[in-house]
Image (spheres, rainbow, N blue to C red):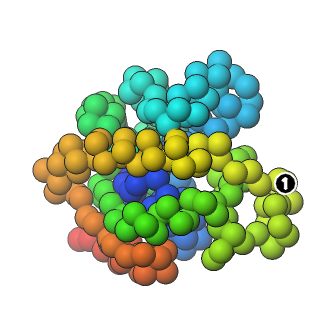
Amino acid sequence: MNPLRLLLLGAPGSGKGTQTSKLLNQFKHIKSVSSGDLLRRRIQQKTELGRIASEYISQGKLLPDSLMNDLVVGELSVRGWLSADSSFLLDGFPRTLEQARSLRVQLTPHNASLNLVVELDVPTDVILERIENRYVHVPSGRVYNLTYNPPKVPGKDDVTGEPLIKRPDDTSEVFGKRLKNYAETVEPLKQFYSELGILKTVSGPTSDIIFPQLLKLVVQKLHQP
Ligand code: AMP
């Protein structure tokens, strides 16, 4: 089986977190890193980076590229994933062309470059409806939706029983900015990965329609001769 080093691209609310959970359930040898989750954990732990992050996040702004690179590559290194046989899934990073370039520069010497990038293409009206009903469990990054994926006990995480929160950046004003950021930054990013020949797109309004398409791409990559 080949290693899988996958990046999921998609607008905020396009279901990257949900697709990630589904993939991790199916492939136990694959683990994920979500840049947003890393930042939210720093905020909860009240670290210096957390303080900086909360200022950007609350305004719907992207953090500086160099800071994000250090954070995520540091995490990959700590987890021992800077190696040719590692498999991992990235969610939310790289998000700009600059981040993509510098990640590539850092992974290439370890023969650990990304080998699949999948864009989740979900209609905007569906995304807006989802965000209104979205709740998260910060320590694990688990995502719930009151309409189609509610927690077993209202307001509590299914696994730990800890409280769920509404993300403060899921308000309509901040969320609008985040959608706009995405639209502005994603095109050069897609171009970069398309030139490397590893970009694919999956489309649909629900995670149940998207997931089988994503699964097919992942299985192909794992078993490609
Ligand atoms: P997410 O959970 O992926 O929606 O990320 C939440 C927020 O964290 C974003 O709106 C940004 O403010 C910040 N963030 C997460 N990942 C990145 C990144 N790769 N580059 C810059 N900012 C990021």
Mark 1 Cβ inside 8 Å of ligand 1:
no
Residue 128 horizontal/vertical position (percent): 49, 61
Residue 51 horizontal/vertical position (percent): 64, 22
The answer to which image quadrant residue 216 occupies is: bottom left
Query: Please, which residue is most extreme toward the left here?
Result: 195
**Closer-to-camera residue (5/224):** 5
* Element on which disc 1 rests: loop
The answer to which image quadrant residue 6 occupies is: bottom left
Drawn side of residue 66 relative to residue 111, left or right: right
- Residue under the image location 31 percent in, 57 percent down: 117
Query: Please, which residue is most extreme toward the top here?
Result: 48
According to the image, label 1 marks what residue?
A: 162
Residue 175 horizontal/vertical position (percent): 50, 47
- Residue under the image location 45 percent in, 47 percent down: 176
Q: Quadrant of the C terminus?
A: bottom left
**Above or below: residue 98 compared with residue 187:** above
Number of marks drawn: 1
**Above or below: residue 174 compared with residue 3:** above
Q: Is residue 92 visible?
A: no
